[in-house]
Amino acid sequence: MNDEFDLLESSTPAFDIKAFLFRTLRYWKLFLLCIGIGLFFAYQQNIRKQQSYSLNTQISIEDNTNPLFSSNTSLTFNWGGVYGKIRTIITTLRSRSIHEKVVDSLEYYVTYLKQSRFRKDDIYKAAPFKFELTPNAYQMLNMPIKVSYLGEGVYELHVVNDNGTTKVLDAQNFSDKTKGQLTINP
């Protein structure tokens, strides 16, 4: 029985790393081909993929006006108090009205798009012009306007009208948020 163990211990290792590396290096052409195909597919996907943007923020809310809460007061003892005020502030921050104020102040209701190879890309800050809207007049909703550059500071605006007839569009007055309709003649 000891002879069997001696034979197993004295035999050569079962896995030869040097031979394995030489065998795998024989397929270097296949490796290069697979890497090239992978890079080609990744490039094709990236040029067709729309850019995604995200924004994160962290807000710290403190309340030092509660007389029951001090540095040596136990958090389990202080029922409510600060928590109710913090929940009110968080609800206010998540409310629709604050989002509407942000959209109005940054004029996000106007979208500047540029036709690229595969889709229309948003060029919000990179547009060579800016529309100045009259806030107390009705503005078209969800209707693209084509802007053609004619020369130095000269642009031509086209409203896309497919059938060449009079068109009634939804509109909104952004100063008082009322909705109405606009009529466009060919």
Image (cartoon, grey):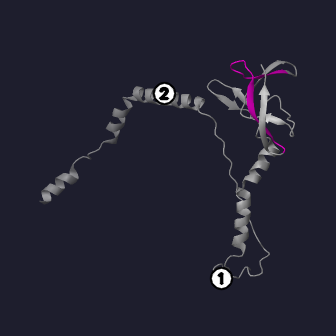
Crowding near the residue tagged with mark 1, few <14, some 14–19, many ≥20 C-alpha atoms within 10 Å: few
- Pick whichever, 103 or 11, lies toward us: 103
Q: Residue furthest left?
A: 1
Of the image marks 1 and 2, the number of the one nearer the N terminus: 2
Counting from the top left corner in percent of width and height, residue 78 is at: 68, 80
Amino acid type at circle 1 is Phe
Which residue is located at x 64 percent, y 40 percent?
Answer: 52
Element at badge 2?
A: helix
| Residue type for callout 2 | Gly
Q: From the viewer's side, name the closer residue of 61 and 136.
A: 136
Q: Where on the picture, by quarter, is residue 138?
A: top right
Q: In the rendering, at what x and y percent does residue 141 appear?
A: 74, 35
* 66 to 106, vertically: above or below: below
Numbered disc 1: secondary structure: loop
* Location of mark 1 (residue): 77
Decide whether residue 98 is among the magenta residues: no
Residue appearing at x 17%, y 57% in the figure: 5
> Which quadrant would the C terminus be assigned to in this image?
top right
What's the residue at 80%, 35% (across, down)?
139
Would you say 57 lies left or right of 118 here? right
Position of the N terminus by quadrant: bottom left
Tell which of 69 and 20 is nearer to you.
69
Residues drawn in magenta: 155-175
Looking at the image, residue 126 lies above or below residue 79: above
Where residue 10 appears, as percent x and y from the top left, is: 21, 51
Numbered circle sitting on residue 36: 2
For marks 1 and 2, give the one nearer the viewer. Answer: 1
Tell me, for residue 150, which label it has, or none. Answer: none
The spot of residue 172 in percent (x, y) is: 78, 39
